[in-house]
Amino acid sequence: MRSNKFVDSWIREMAEMTRPDKIVWIDGSEEQANALRAEAVSTGEMIKLNEEKLPNCYLHRTAINDVARVEGRTFICTPTKEEAGNINNWKDPKEMYAILKRLYTGSMKGKTMYVIPYSMGVVGSEFSKIGIELTDSIYVVLNMLIMTRAGAPVMEALGDSPDFVKGLHAVADCDEENRYITHFPQDNTIMSVNSAYGGNVLLGKKCFALRIASYLGRKEGWMAEHMLILGVEYPNGDVKYVTAAFPSACGKTNLAMLIPPEMYRKKGYKVWTVGDDIAWLRVNKKDGKLYAMNPENGFFGVAPGTNSHSNPNALATTMRDTIFTNVCHNLDDNTVWWEGLNDNPPTNAINWKGEKWDYRTYNKADKVNTSGAHPNSRFTASAKNCPCLSGEFDSPTGVPISAIIFGGRRAKTAPLVYQSFNWQHGTFVGSIMASETTAAAAGAVGVVRRDPMAMRPFVGYNMGDYWQHWLDMGKAIAHAPKIFHVNWFRTDDEGHFIWPGFGDNFRVLLWILDRCEDKVDAVETAIGYVPKAEDINIEGMNDITVDTIRDLLSVDRGAWLEDIGNIEEFYAQVGDHVPATLKEELAALKARLAD
Ligand code: GTP
Ligand code: SPV
Ligand code: MN
């Protein structure tokens, strides 16, 4: 493999500290990946699943205390606290490097250090960025081989350049008290220790492609966002693209792989997946539009709830070459199962904790302890295996975006869909996003919290400056996308979801795209433009009437006014860096609601 003196000297320094027995470069070859899989199976780190039913698929269980991102232990280490802002955890870089040095010292003794050169985005494209992850976990290597473009071609693309993101990961003792997921934006460096789970350790994903990239994006005039990217193909062959930012475990993978309702399929409508989690967005100088590309190469998707009705494309994607993490193991046929896959839980099964599991003990009120699969169990699957993968997936520049959609889990306040008045107001709508917390991060589930642009855990600098960057980007895009907000999760008095969601969300997408082309009217309300109920097509839907839609679209002024207080508190918490224009938008919303 081509060597690079900057990479070499950094590896030397990290190896002197962690002291691995050997260092192995990941070249991206199938032979090497196969050897690593065999090794992981021989040590029990991974379980090889039924080759006939799930070819080249594996099961892995992480430690019971290590099953989700840990926001409380995630740090942005900028020289000043002000740069990181009040929403991020901050520590002085010198202090954090000292803490980490203690934890890393000797942590790889008796182990192998793997060197993974990887590219976020197509290898060699001017919009892609290169990272090197050093890790002592084969599980991480095999995940990175699916999630990124990794191996020797990346070193060729890097050439003699010092421009790469350094990432050091050590499982160490997997001690939660000493778990740190740390970012040093000024040093292009990520250091993660004492975890072996997903977003904490696959450093190309949230750490690089969102936290470090958002910092770089602000400096370089582009955006890194927690967004899916999809294309809607019309019967005439036109394809229109949208991005959508929903918080973790709030429906990005599902929307990105949506299958339109039958009546639309018959007419020739299709949905194509470009990305399901992260979008890098840039202004195209030639046509003045905003383009989005997916820097990842696979899906690290939520398993529970995925089934042949909700998301057949995801299920098909995971039928081969997939790593399942913390799902339930069906011992009868050596396959996997999770809550919501079907109504036939295995009777001879091992749960996500690695214990014998009796499905009859399942108790919805205590999911984590009684379910077969952890609520945040995941599949890691290659994009190439996705039946609805967009032909533009490997496009180095990405696809032109017509609409940006924000959304979250709100039992009441937020209507099914509304449109912002303009980019500035749309930025405001993103800044006041809120959602019920999910199992994707450690901590309480189901608590409403503000999660601006679905980026609360992922902005690598001051949240107020991030909002200002959104406002600045709006001015730089001649033909800016229109900005919308959706909520698939309104509930009735018994707590049931009113809107069926999944494939039927296509009906809302069509209204959004019609709005982008001025093909349909809307009603102006205090919060934005809301559809006329009869403009959401309900043909072919059971149990949904125009009145249901009217109800889903209603704006409860009382509930919104109550929310305003919470937004004001949140803005105060973000502090001095909140742009004045957003404070004006907030005051204007309050006035319109009181009107
Ligand atoms: P991250 O990978 O954590 O960023 O999550 P994500 O936004 O990709 O979430 P995902 O699509 O995996 O959905 C998470 C959960 O929400 C799954 O259990 C889904 O079944 C459920 N879900 C997704 N879309 C809908 C919907 O339209 N309606 C309802 N009721 N549930 C949905
Ligand atoms: C999320 O939590 O938003 C994820 C999963 O997409 S993780 O990679 O663990 O961050
Ligand atoms: Mn995510």
Image (cartoon, helix red, strand yellow):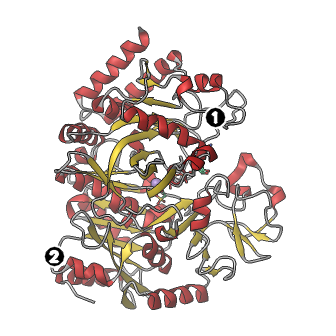
Looking at mark 2, is its residue's CB closer than 8 Å to ligand 2? no
Q: Earlier in the sequence, mark 2 or mark 1?
A: 2
Tag shown at residue 161: 2
Going 42% across and 10% down the picture, which residue do you hit? 594
- Give the left or right position of residue 404, taking residue 214 as reference: right
The CA span between labels 2 and 1 is: 57 Å
Label 1 element class? loop
Query: Of the residues tagged 2 and 1, which is closer to the observer?
Result: 1
Position in image of residue 169 (x %, y %): 39, 72
Do the residues bearing badges 2 and 1 touch, measured as CB atoms within 8 Å? no
Q: How many marks?
A: 2
Using the image, determine if residue 39 lies above or below residue 88.
Answer: below
Image-quadrant location for residue 78? bottom left
- The amino acid type, in three-letter code, at marker 2 is Ser
Relative height, residue 192 to residue 479 (above, below): below
Residue 547 % position (x, y): 64, 22
Residue 451 visible from this viewpoint: no
Label 1, on which residue? 539
Task: Say if disc 1 is inside 8 Å of ligand 1.
Answer: no
Identified by mark 1, the residue type is Glu
Nearest the viewer among 560 and 221 is 221
**x and y, in percent, of residue 271 in the image:** 49, 52
Quadrant occupied by the N terminus? bottom left
| Residue 159 position by quadrant | bottom left
Instruction: Give the quadrant of the C terminus.
Output: top left
8 in relation to 477, above or below: below
Question: 362 left or right of 567?
Answer: right
The answer to whether one can see residue 512 in this image is yes
